[in-house]
Image (tube, rainbow, N blue to C red):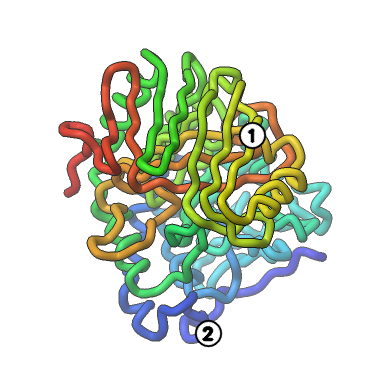
Amino acid sequence: MTMAMFLIPALSACAPEGGGGAGAREILDFEALSANLLARMDLQPGERVLLVGEGGSRWDAIVPLLRAGVRAAGGVDLGAVDVRGAVLRAGEPGAGADADAGGPAQFAASLGTAPEGWSEPLATVDVAVKLPGAAADPSLDNDVYRALQDVLRGGRGRTVHFHWAGATSFEMEELAVDDRVDRLYQTAVLDTDYAALADTLAAFETALKSGPVRVTTPAGTDLTFLVDDGPVTRQDGDASAARADLARNLIDREVELPAGAARVLPVLESVVGRIAFPPAQWGGERAEGVVLHFEGGRVVEVEADAGRDGVLREIEEAGEAGRIFRELGVGFNPLLAMPEGEAWIPYYGYGDAVVRLSLGDNTELGGSVGGGYVRWNFFPDATVTVGAEVWVEGGRLTEGRRPSAR
């Protein structure tokens, strides 16, 4: 597919995402969100910024705000790319950006028409903002999202991963974005105390290096492992160049907003024990009472009260990655906590003591197991002990572990 130029559509043409209706646009403060993203980037003069999104969504409304903010901060505005087909949104009328040396028009020309030629120009991007709707799509040959990830893996650049998804049921089914998700996520982006969050995540990283980690749940999970000097990614919202210079893996360079989780790649050989899963879909069928037993970081036994064939089928179809423990994630953002009286988990478990025990491909965390398969698993009632210190107890951060909220 060729690169084509088009103007940002009028606001009235933007379709709201799932369930939001006409009120969804009133809920979202695009100007405040844009200002917050720009603050998180901490742009330096001359840094080159590219936006990646899904054309025709309501999030088109934030594109001109971000581009104007980039120019006001002394950055170089490279325009925006539609991830599905790599269509470059070059310049809104009157912006004058296309006439700037090194601006959108020149960048579009450098990209050309073939995905095979993208790596070189994308490597000149200092910051890419992945807007809602931008996601890796294995069905596309010309997936800009994946091409940018390859650049990050090579130790170049950084991205702001501005998700607006990841609301999940207790049975691991992703939920549609609606007004309640809009409100909760916007509050988390705008009102998080980023300094307090950074301090808490740094303290957790220090603790992880000091002793064995144990995760238990009332359902029977009992897993232990070591971290040693392995990478711990602190998703504290710092998308500055200074932070990127310290990156040890892909996700250190891919900064999540909303922020809030510590993501941990354990020493694989040290992972031993069992994970007891909530009821969920495995291999196309519902499975209950699933318990996976691990030795040396690999599944050695599968139990299930129902749906065991589906579990085995999913694991086998995934190849090696299906049997590998991937990561521990612990959420620390109090503004992404599960809403009182509601049975859903916001934003990929980044909030307030939600624990994530994942299986699969660990390359983005700095591991060596590929294959592409990843299975998220969320535990809202876990206890996490590091050495002799309890950080999470029964789904609650222990005293002094919870960062303040502004």
Q: Nearer the viewer, residue 87 or 103?
A: 87
x, y (%) of residue 144? 69, 54
| Residue beneath the point at 36% across and 68% down | 182
Q: Nearer the viewer, residue 344 or 76?
A: 344
Q: Is residue 46 visible?
A: no
Q: Quadrant of the N terminus?
A: bottom right
Residue 339, located in which quarter of the rendered image? bottom left
Reply above or below: 266 against 195: above
* Disc number placed over residue 119 in the picture, else none: none
x, y (%) of residue 203? 29, 24
Q: Nearer the viewer, residue 123 or 216?
A: 216
**Sequence-earlier tag: 1 or 2:** 2
Q: Relative to residue 323, is residue 325 drawn left or right?
A: left
Residue 326, located in which quarter of the rendered image? top right
Residue ID for mark 1: 301
Q: Amino acid at mark 2?
A: Ala
Within 10 Å of disc 2 (Cα), the crowding (few <14, some 14-19, many 20+) is few
Residue ID for mark 2: 13
Reply above or below: 330 against 31: above
SS of the residue at dot 2? helix
Q: Relative to residue 9, is residue 386 drawn left or right?
A: left
Within 10 Å of disc 1 (Cα), the crowding (few <14, some 14-19, many 20+) is few
Q: CA distance from mark 1 to mark 2?
A: 53 Å
Residue furthest front as drawn: 305
x, y (%) of residue 95? 50, 67
Q: Is residue 141 visible?
A: yes
Q: Relative to residue 304, is residue 121 drawn left or right?
A: right
Reply above or below: 330 against 24: above
| Residue beneath the point at 62% across and 45% down | 374
Q: Amino acid at mark 1?
A: Glu
Q: Nearer the viewer, residue 82 or 271?
A: 271
